[in-house]
Image: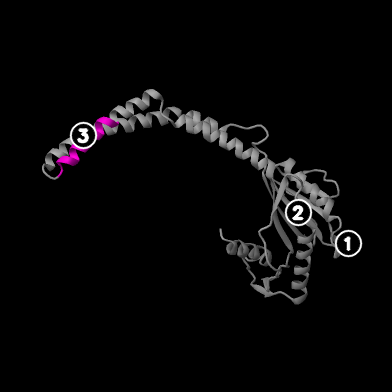
């Protein structure tokens, strides 16, 4: 994806929260006050994002000035938000090594055994001899060339069958490698997407969400895939909510990082 496309995508995300939703009652223009609040609050969110902890890096695809949408659905309010991804570089390296190790083992299994390779080589040699004879005869004796290629066909089919039999034989082993769990890698997130929004009203967790404790946060829940954390309240009484996607330990790492930093957001405003 080009830089221009990434910029456009991020701009659409920040400036058009409503763009992908239907507006059954039609749209409305946003007011100057709404747009000003949107830009100021989103800018504050961006400025409050903590730097990545040691061993992590942060991916922020949005570049350029933050702008507010000029319209929204009737009955809807602009919701200031910002999105980034925290990437655990050290875990990324471990995951890549685990995948490389699996790939090497699979590639080794895909190789023919010495006995199979010898059969393929012998059959291939016979097929190539007949093919060369057919090529030599094609202009002067097409019928002879066709006859030679007919003789060549069984050798080609045998080679194909040997290869197919090998694939069938090793398929269960390859599937087992794909399904292997790697301690410290399998089920551990390398990327933790974070969406932070500021909106009025209480946050209602899902029915399956488990309440957890995050130091500095007003409320936090985790449902096995997503962690929702109320980081605090801004100067206008709106909740600052982070939606964090990832395995629990890694999501908690980022949630704690955010909670310790966003405590000061209301003071900044």
Q: Is residue 247 visible?
A: yes
Picture coordinates of residue 120, whole percent (x, y)? 33, 29
Asked if residue 129 lies in the magenta stretch, the reply is yes
Name the quadrant containing residue 94: top right
Quadrant for the N terminus in the image:
bottom right
Determine crowd level at label 2: few under 14, some 14-19, many 20+ residues with C-alpha closer than 10 A: many
Label placed on residue 4: none
Name the quadrant containing residue 7: bottom right
Query: What secondary structure is found at the residue carrying circle 2?
Result: strand
Q: Which residues are magenta?
A: 124-138
Q: Residue at x 67, y 44 (%)?
A: 190
Q: CA distance from mark 1 to mark 2?
A: 18 Å
Determine crowd level at label 1: few under 14, some 14-19, many 20+ residues with C-alpha closer than 10 A: few
Asked if residue 177 lies in the magenta stretch, the reply is no
Disc nearest the viewer among 2 and 3: 3
For disc 3, the marked residue is: 130
Disc nearest the viewer among 1 and 2: 1
Among all residues in the image, which is located at the extreme top?
115
Q: Mark 2 vs mark 3: which is more N-terminal? A: 3
Q: Mark 1 vs mark 3: which is more N-terminal? A: 3
Name the quadrant containing residue 83: bottom right
Q: Residue at x 75, y 59 (%)?
A: 197
Query: What secondary structure is found at the residue carrying circle 3?
Result: helix
Query: What secondary structure is found at the residue carrying circle 1?
Result: helix
* Image height of 54 relative to 32, above or below: above
Q: Mark 1 vs mark 2: which is more N-terminal? A: 2
Label placed on residue 242: 2
For disc 1, the marked residue is: 267
């Amino acid at each position: 994806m080009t830089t221009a496309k990434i910029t456009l995508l991020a701009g659409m995300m920040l400036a058009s929260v409503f763009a992908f939703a239907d507006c059954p009652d039609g749209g409305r223009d946003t007011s100057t006050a709404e747009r000003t609040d949107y830009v100021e609050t989103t800018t504050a969110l961006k400025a409050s994002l903590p730097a990545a902890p040691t061993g992590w890096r942060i991916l922020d695809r949005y570049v350029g000035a933050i702008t507010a949408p000029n319209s929204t659905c009737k009955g809807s309010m602009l919701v200031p938000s910002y999105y980034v991804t925290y990437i655990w570089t050290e875990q990324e390296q471990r995951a890549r090594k685990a995948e490389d190790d699996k790939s090497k083992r699979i590639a080794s299994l895909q190789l023919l055994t010495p006995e199979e390779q010898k059969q393929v080589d012998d059959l291939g040699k016979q097929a190539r001899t007949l093919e060369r004879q057919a090529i030599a005869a094609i202009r002067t004796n097409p019928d002879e060339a066709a006859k030679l290629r007919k003789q060549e066909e069984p050798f080609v089919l045998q080679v194909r069958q040997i290869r197919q039999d090998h694939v069938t034989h090793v398929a269960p082993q390859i599937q087992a490698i794909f399904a292997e769990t790697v301690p410290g890698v399998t089920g551990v997130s390398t990327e933790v997407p974070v969406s932070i929004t500021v909106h009025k009203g209480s946050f209602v967790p899902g029915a399956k969400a488990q309440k957890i404790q995050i130091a500095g946060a007003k409320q936090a829940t985790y449902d096995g895939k997503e962690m929702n954390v109320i980081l605090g309240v801004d100067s206008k009484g709106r909740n600052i909510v982070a939606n964090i996607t990832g395995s629990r330990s890694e999501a908690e790492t980022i949630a704690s990082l955010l909670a310790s930093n966003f405590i000061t957001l209301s003071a900044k405003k």
